[in-house]
Amino acid sequence: MLRRPAVLAVALALSCGALMSSSAALAGAGSAVTRAGRPPAGVLGIDVSSWQPHVNWSVVKADHLRFAYVKATEGTYYQSPTFGPQMRGARRAGIVTGAYHFATPDTSGGAAQARYFAAHGGGWRAGALPGVLDIEYNPYGSDKCYGLPPRAMIRWIRAFVSTYHASTGWWPVINTYTSWWNRCTGNSKAFAARDPLWVNAHRRTASPLPAGWTSCTVWQWAETGTYPSDQDVIPASLFAGLQHEPR
């Protein structure tokens, strides 16, 4: 099914408040009750990297896991050594996959990092989830905004998403924390119209969201649980649409 990416971004919108944890959420989740609490209603998934090198994909699939995002790249200097095995293992188990890029805005430009990501696992393939720009607190230094003031950070993000869209046909999903977004982009609303949102919010609801977005597509709702790594959820009404051809 063909959809233009700009239209698809709108179609992927759903109130994150609807994903509040509840008893009803267990109706389709079977035994997937986590140490962090009951999972929100929706399609359950995880995001993994080389920190989780040995996921038993058949086991997590049997426990109702439906999707997995896998780290492909970071900056323009790192390709995850576990990316290929993790993607192949998940796909063999019947789990829908997608790739994500960890941004380091202080090491190279947004356009260069988008091209690097697209060339090393981030390009779209049939049945895959759209690529993700993971942009959040700097884990390597004291300046959590990578030394960039808000206007420069907005330019960096714009260069990444525009270059990635030109290369793949997708407007990438933006994965972030509301607190980081408010601090490091100055509460920018510049990307809400086109880029679907993945919000990291380890509490009972995903709100409040970053500026401009009134809804989210992916919610990382817990760091630990039944599945090995972060616990994610996508609204069931959006899940199939995420896998459609972008062009």
Image: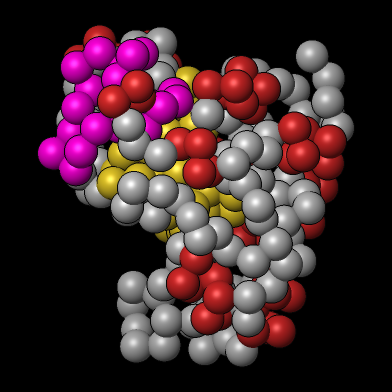
Q: Which of 69 and 16 is in front in this view?
A: 16
Residue 181 lies in quadrant: bottom right
Q: Which residue is drawn at 35% across and 84% down?
A: 141
- Quadrant of image for the N terminus: top right
Give the left or right position of residue 121, taking residue 93 as reference: right
- Quadrant of image for the C terminus: top right
User: What secondary structure characterizes most of the magenta part?
Assistant: loop
Q: Which of 172 and 226 is in front in this view?
A: 226
Residue 83 lies in quadrant: top left
- Image: 20 above or below 105: above
Q: Which of 187 and 3 is in front in this view?
A: 187
Q: Which residue is drawn at 63% across and 75% down?
A: 187
- Image: 50 above or below 88: below
Q: Position of residue 66 (x, y in %)?
A: 40, 19
> Can I make out residue 201 in this image?
yes
Give the left or right position of residue 151, taking residue 57 as reference: right
* Residue 36 belongs to the span the image colors magenta: yes
* Residue 205 belongs to the span the image colors magenta: no
> Can I make out residue 58 in this image?
no
Residue 233 lies in quadrant: top left
Give the left or right position of residue 66, taking residue 112 as reference: left
Display coloring: secondary structure
- Image: 43 above or below 70: above
Q: Please give the range of residues in magenta.
A: 26-47
Q: Where is residue 51 in the image (x, y as percent from the top left)?
A: 23, 48
Q: Where is residue 204 in the image (x, y as percent from the top left)?
A: 34, 47
Q: Which residue is drawn at 19% across and 27% down?
A: 33
